[in-house]
Image: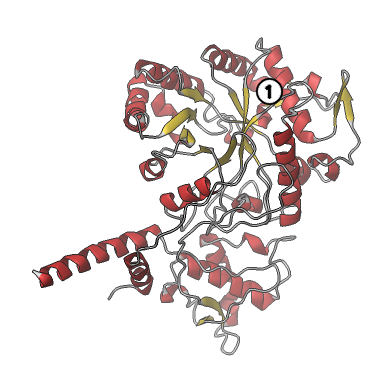
Amino acid sequence: MVPPGVMAWAAFIVLVVSAAVLPSPATADGVGVNWGTMMSHPMLPTTVVQMLKDNGIRKVKLFDADPWTVGALAGTAIEVMLAIPNDQLQRMCKHKHAAEWVKENVTQYDHEGGVHIKYVAVGNEPFLESYNGSFINSTFPALKNVQSALDEAGVGDRIKAVVPLNADVYFSPANDPVPSAGSFRKDIEELMVDIVRFLNSNGAPFVVNIYPFLSLNQNPNFPVEFAFFDGGSQPVTDKGAQYTNVFDANYDTLVWSVKKAGVPDMKITIGEIGWPTDGVKNANVDYAKRFFDGFSRKMAKKEGTPLRPGPLDFYLFGLLDEDMKSVLPGNFERHWGIFTFDGKPKFPMDLSGKGKDEYLVGAKGVQHLPAQWCVLNVEDRGDFRSIPSSVNYACANADCTALGYGSSCNGLSSDGNVSYAFNSYFQTMDQDVRACNFDGLATIVTTNMSTGSCLFPVQILSNAQKTAALSLMALLMTVAAAGLA
């Protein structure tokens, strides 16, 4: 029997749709985004790439070098940062492995009509204190080997190896919390100086991830206005420079740090900056819109920071919500997208920074599973004593972060919480009827259970189902052709 989701997709792809080519919306110069794929149901890469093009997004930062994703960017002229995950850094410490990686993931795409690769990210925030030094000994050797391999492949003059780092690699002391007191973290100071000088000698930038949201979320005494760009906060004065927001102060703390490392003119790229929309109290659509509007205006004006006036290089974080990301840093981790998991814009957003309050162009042709939900069977609850364990199981294997305090579904009743958990698991499991059992506690309904700001999602067709549908179509076409012969 052909699964209904596969048949729906097969029916969809039989149609030949002719779409007019729409002009790309105006964006601030060099708008980039982070495209993560830690989702239970990722969209087709070609669908995401079309969405990038429709919105005039010219740069994309990836977290791996998946050939399906990278291949979809071929011929687009979108500038790409590939990535080598942290768990591969030790392998890159051997030059031959770095050379193999470059041959497989860089040079094969480096041709006319290929992929416009600009950077190779060696690791991702490898010096986070929470990693307990796991990558301290492998990151720099890997960086040097990858850059050497790029040079040997004849592309090192235009494709640079970089290391995206969290802003926790530098700091200002608690007794002097101003940018000019900034320096690299003491436990990695010597290593950071070596990395900075190596990057600079190769014409590569220092890639840093800066999150004003985290400053606000982690410190209950942090002044809210200082997290945004629209004024209202008490300025901080440091050696004649005035800081009215934490982004400028953080960025210039890095400027001071690289200056003290002997590279005062170090190029800096903002690898990640954004604001989540759910999961905790300060992660909401209103704050996200306020943050992105202010940041876009700032980028459009090319005003930079007090120590680095002028245009800044940046990648927004992130493109899409990712329901499989780790929530160890917080429930907000799965809600960084400026688009929902299925490619819908969350709020009006002006990438041009010129005050146009319009929704971005959403993903086209996304196919959802049938409009049905798995919910608590209130008429026949079965053994209610198993509800807690059933909810725990559902939320351990699916995304329930919207239920947290201050989140979009925080106001549900106890029955609503159970239904949300059951449905999240049901959707994650491709609406398999066996995933809506829970010891007889659940039932499938066709009434949308969403209420207010709380969305009970219906998942999209998974790539596996789409692949199966394509195979089915090929088979049907073969059979039809044979019948006509």
Which quadrant of the figure contains the C terminus?
bottom left
Q: Is residue 266 left or right of residue 139?
A: right
Q: Kindly indicate the quadrant of the structure image that contains residue 468.
A: bottom left
Relative depth, front residue between 314 and 125: 314
How many numbered callouts? 1
Q: Position of residue 57 (x, y in %)?
A: 55, 42
The residue shown at (54%, 61%) is: 396
Relative depth, front residue between 344 and 375: 344
Q: Amino acid at mark 1?
A: Arg
Say if residue 390 shows up in the picture.
no
The residue shown at (57%, 85%) is: 381
Which quadrant of the figure contains the N terminus?
bottom left
Name of the residue lying farthest toward the right = 234
* Residue 468 vertical position relative to residue 144 in the rendered view, above or below: below
Q: Kindly indicate the quadrant of the structure image that contains residue 129.
A: top right
Q: Position of residue 443 (x, y in %)?
A: 51, 82
Q: Position of residue 220 (x, y in %)?
A: 83, 46
* Residue 105 vertical position relative to residue 463 in the rendered view, above or below: above
Q: Please tell me how crowded label 1 is: few (under 14), some (14-19), or many (20+) other residues with Cα within 10 Å.
A: some
Name of the residue lying farthest toward the bottom = 379
Q: Is residue 20 left or right of residue 300?
A: left
Say if residue 305 shows up in the picture.
yes
Q: Is residue 287 left or right of residue 152?
A: right
SS for tag 1? Answer: loop
Q: Position of residue 116 (x, y in %)?
A: 43, 32
Q: Is residue 90 left or right of residue 400?
A: left
Q: Which residue is mark 1?
A: 185
Relative depth, front residue between 218 and 454: 454
The residue shown at (11%, 68%) is: 482
Name of the residue lying farthest toward the left = 485
The figure's colour scheme reads secondary structure
